[in-house]
Image: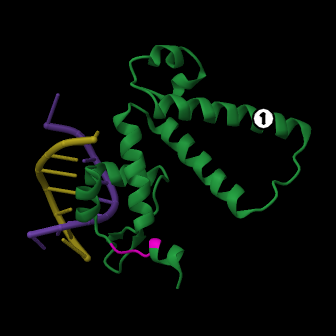
Chain colours: A green, B purple, C yellow
DNA sequence: CTTCTCACA
DNA sequence: TGTGAGTA
């Protein structure tokens, strides 16, 4: 059993995760509905979260605090998974013209969103709220 | 006692 | 998102 397996081991119940992330049980369950986290169920239908799940929730917590909405969070998580795929799959499969172009624009969006999210004191959201990134904020 | 689902003066 | 009901 390697590190990855341990990180994905279902260990924590709702109470622990809730306290750890400062998210309400309601919120955590809601995020699960949105597919942001996928905790395993115990025999009693209780949710069991892994370190991996907790990490995701902590990231989500940060984004929520920054005023990012579900669309933005889903987008960020999606691109995060894409990055993981790129790291796991050696060469990026040659993409066709149209697909390629779309991916590029998406990546540019990703970079923009990232930049704004990370270094944002979010008082200058005005610039991004006006643009396409507005759909990622309240 | 804790968590789950469902529903909403 | 909160919260209460009724369970498991």
Quadrant the C terminus of chain A occupies: top left
Residue A12 located within the stretch drawn in magenta? no
Q: SS of the residue at dot 1?
A: helix
Q: Give the range drawn in magenta.
A: A7-11
Measured as percent of width and height from the top left, residue A28 is found at: 34, 53
Measured as percent of width and height from the top left, residue A64 is found at: 37, 38
Chain holding disc 1: A
Measured as percent of width and height from the top left, residue A65 is found at: 34, 36
Q: Quadrant of residue A112?
A: top right
Residue A10 located within the stretch drawn in magenta? yes
Q: Is the magenta stretch mostly helix, strand or loop?
A: loop
Q: Residue at x 47, y 14 (%)?
A: A126
Q: In which quarter of the image is residue A93?
A: bottom right
Q: Nearer the viewer, residue B5 or A22?
A: A22
Q: Is residue A30 above or below residue A134?
A: below
Q: Which residue is drawn at 62% across and 34% down?
A: A111
Q: In this view, does A94 lie to the left or right of A125?
A: right
Question: Which residue is disc 1 drawn over?
Answer: A102
Measured as percent of width and height from the top left, residue A96 is found at: 90, 43
Q: Nearer the viewer, residue B7 or A84?
A: A84
Point out the residue furthest to the front here: A119
Q: Is residue A17 left or right of residue A56?
A: left
How crowded is the residue under tag 1: few (<14 C-alpha within 10 Å), some, or many (20+)? few
Q: Nearer the viewer, residue A71 or A129?
A: A129
Q: In this view, does A52 lie above or below A82?
A: below
Q: In which quarter of the image is residue A85?
A: bottom right
């Amino acid at each position: 059993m390697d590190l990855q397996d341990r990180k994905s081991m279902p260990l924590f119940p709702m109470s622990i995760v809730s306290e750890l992330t400062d998210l309400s049980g309601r919120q955590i369950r809601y995020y699960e509905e949105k597919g942001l986290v996928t905790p395993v169920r115990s025999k009693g239908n209780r949710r069991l979260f892994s370190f991996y799940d907790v990490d995701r929730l902590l990231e989500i917590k940060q984004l929520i605090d920054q005023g990012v909405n579900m669309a933005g969070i889903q987008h960020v998580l999606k691109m995060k998974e894409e990055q993981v795929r790129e790291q796991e799959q050696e060469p990026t499969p040659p993409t066709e013209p149209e697909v390629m172009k779309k991916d590029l624009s998406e990546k540019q969006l990703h970079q923009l969103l990232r930049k704004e999210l990370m270094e944002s004191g979010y008082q200058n959201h005005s610039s991004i709220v006006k643009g396409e990134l507005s759909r990622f904020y309240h």
